[in-house]
Amino acid sequence: MTTPLKLAPRAVPGVGMTGQRAVERLLQRLREQGITDERVLRAIGSVPRHQFIDEALASRAYEDTALPIGRGQTISQPWVVARMTEALIERSLPKRVLEVGTGSGYQAAVLSTLGIEVFTVERIDELLRDARRRFRQLSLDIRSRHDDGRLGWPEHGPFDGIIVTAGGAALEAPLLEQLAPGGTLVAPVGGASAQRLLRLRREGDTIEQDDLGAVVFVPLLSGVQ
Ligand code: SAH
C-alpha cells in the first residue's frame, strides 16, 4: 500500500521539498539565536535567498552563513539580516527606508516584503545590475541607485529608517541628516576587527544610541565602480 505524500505548505517559491525543510531549519536556528519578531521570521521565510546567490552556491542558500556574491562582496548572514531588520522595525514599522550597500539585494527584498518602501544605493554597478534583475524577477518595487551611499539619497530623504550594510570607521554625517525625527538608523561602525552594530534614534534634538553587539561586515568604501 502506498502512503499519500504529505505536501508541506510552501512558503518560499521554487525551493522544492528539500529546500523547504532547509528554510524551516534556518527559521528554527534564527529563533534559537534570539530572533523573536514573527514579522521578520515570516519575511525571511518567504524571500527565496537561493535566487540572490550564484547557482553554484544555491545548495547552501539556507545555511546561516554569509556567502560570496562576486567583486569581493558577500550576501550577509541571515541572522545578521534578521537582527538588523528587527532592530530597525522594533519601535514601529518605518514607511520609507534607505539601505546603503545593496549587494545581492537580499536585505532590500526582506524589507520590501515587510511592506516598507525601500530605497537602496550600491557603489558597484555590476552588483547593482544583478540585484535589479532579481527585484524584477520577484516583482519587488524597490528604488535603487548607483552611487556612493555614504552621501545617502538626499532627493528622497528624510527617511524613517536607514540601514547600512557595510562597516565604516564612523557614522556618516549625511546619513544622520537624512534621518527623519523619530527615525531609526542601524549601522556597523568601527575598524575592521572591532565593528559594533549600533542603533541610533533621533528624538527631537537628541540622538539616542544603543550597542547591539559585535559584527563583521565588508568595508564601507568611497567612490563608485
Ligand atoms: N545588503 C547586502 C549586503 C552586501 S555587502 C545584501 O543583502 O546582500 C555590502 C555592500 O555594500 C557591498 O555590495 C558593497 O559594494 C557595498 N558598499 C560598500 N561601500 C559602499 C558605499 N559607500 N556606497 C554604497 N554601497 C557600498
Image (tube, rainbow, N blue to C red):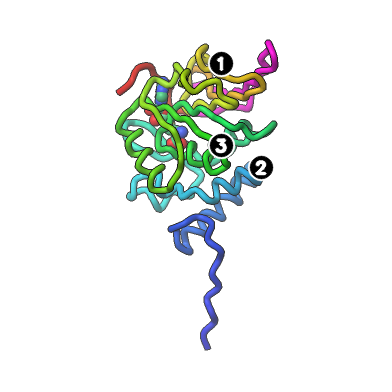
Judging from the image, what secondary structure is the residue with disc 3 in?
A: loop
User: For the point 54% across and 57% down, which residue is it?
Assistant: 11
Work out how far the residue at label 3 is from the one at label 1, CA to CA, in angstroms. Answer: 20 Å
Mark 3: which amino acid? Answer: Ile
Where does ligand 1 appear, by image quarter?
A: top left
Mark 1: which amino acid? Answer: Leu
Disc 2 residue: CB within 8 Å of ligand 1: no
* Res. 116 mark: 3
Neighbourhood count class around disc 1 (C-alpha, 10 Å): few under 14, some 14–19, many 20 upward: many
Q: Main secondary structure of the magenta part?
A: strand
Judging from the image, what secondary structure is the residue with disc 1 in?
A: helix
Mark 2: which amino acid? Answer: Asp
> Is residue 167 depicted above or below 50 in this figure?
above
Judging from the image, what secondary structure is the residue with disc 2 in?
A: loop
What is the magenta range? Answer: 193-216
Neighbourhood count class around disc 3 (C-alpha, 10 Å): few under 14, some 14–19, many 20 upward: many
Residue 206 painted magenta = yes
User: For the point 57% across and 23% down, which residue is it?
Assistant: 196
Can you tell which of label 2 and label 1 is closer to the viewer? 1
